[in-house]
Image (spheres, grey):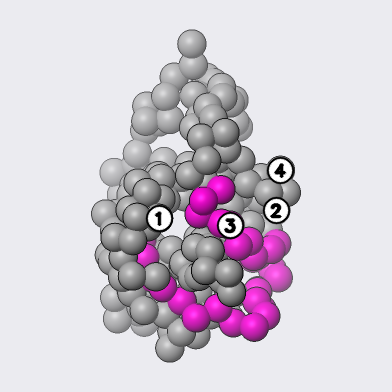
Amino acid sequence: MAASLDDLPIPKNLRDSAVLVPVFRDAAGELQLVMVRRSSFGIHGGQLAFPGGKHEPSDASLLATALREAEEEVGLAADNVEILAELPPIAVPTGFRIAPFLGRISRPEVWLWQQREIQEVLEIPLRHLADPSQHTEEDWQLAGWPMPRRVPFYHVAGGHSLWGASYRIIQPLIQPLLQGHWPV
């Protein structure tokens, strides 16, 4: 049996970062989650993630970081975001402490993403993630892991897997969002 992802060591000195967890209702009233697929370079290359990044000294707060990064990465202006909740921070083995912010957005007509960092912008129906057939666990052996790990993830359109920190952020939000806990 593979070890759990929870067994991966977390560095003592973490770098602050922040992400926006953008949600909106489409024309049919369907609740959509916006994610990005990172470009192939870098430590998180090719992975699904929320718009966000490292906290910079010029950022007034971690919320300012999340909003700045969302605008830089996918062209989502801060004026088009209403923050619904500051979510619990998540520490990850790659050395970051992620501050997630749930935000209701006014979707731009066209997503304009930073092509150097972002491969594509995905709009994922929340109902899709709530479907038990889209959730599974597998044993994965990734570079840098001394042994295989049991990885829970969601299947997302296009053959992508939503796992890791993004999984840990969205998983506890799916049912409350669908049940109207936050007005979206």
Task: Kindly identify the amino acid type of the residue bearing the numbered disc 4.
Answer: Gly
Task: Kindly identify the amino acid type of the residue bearing the numbered disc 1.
Answer: Leu
Q: Nearer the viewer, mark 3 or mark 2?
A: 3
Question: What residue is at 33 percent from the left and 61 percent from the top?
Answer: 180
Residue assigned mark 4:
159
Pointer 4 local density, CA inside 10 Å: few below 14, some 14–19, many at least 20:
few
Residue assigned mark 2:
40
Numbered disc 4: secondary structure: loop
Comes first in the chain, label 4 or label 3: 3
Question: What residue is at 58 percent from the left and 52 percent from the top?
Answer: 48
Give the quadrant of residue 142: top right
Q: Nearer the viewer, residue 143 or 46?
A: 46
The magenta span reads 99-128
Q: Nearer the viewer, residue 136 or 77?
A: 136
In the displayed structure image, the side of residue 70 where residue 18 appears, left or right: left
Q: Are marks 4 and 3 in contact (CB under 8 Å)?
A: no
For the residues labelled 4 and 1, the Cα–Cα distance comes to 24 Å
Comes first in the chain, label 4 or label 1: 4
Whole-percent x, y for residue 8 in the image: 40, 31
Q: Which mark is residue 124?
A: 3
Numbered disc 2: secondary structure: loop
For the residues labelled 4 and 2, the Cα–Cα distance comes to 16 Å
Q: Are marks 1 and 2 in contact (CB under 8 Å)?
A: no
Give the quadrant of residue 144: top right
Residue assigned mark 1:
178
176 lies above or below 32: above
What residue occupies the far front of the structure in this picture? 28
For the residues labelled 4 and 3, the Cα–Cα distance comes to 13 Å
Comes first in the chain, label 3 or label 1: 3
Pointer 1 local density, CA inside 10 Å: few below 14, some 14–19, many at least 20:
some
For the residues labelled 3 and 1, the Cα–Cα distance comes to 13 Å
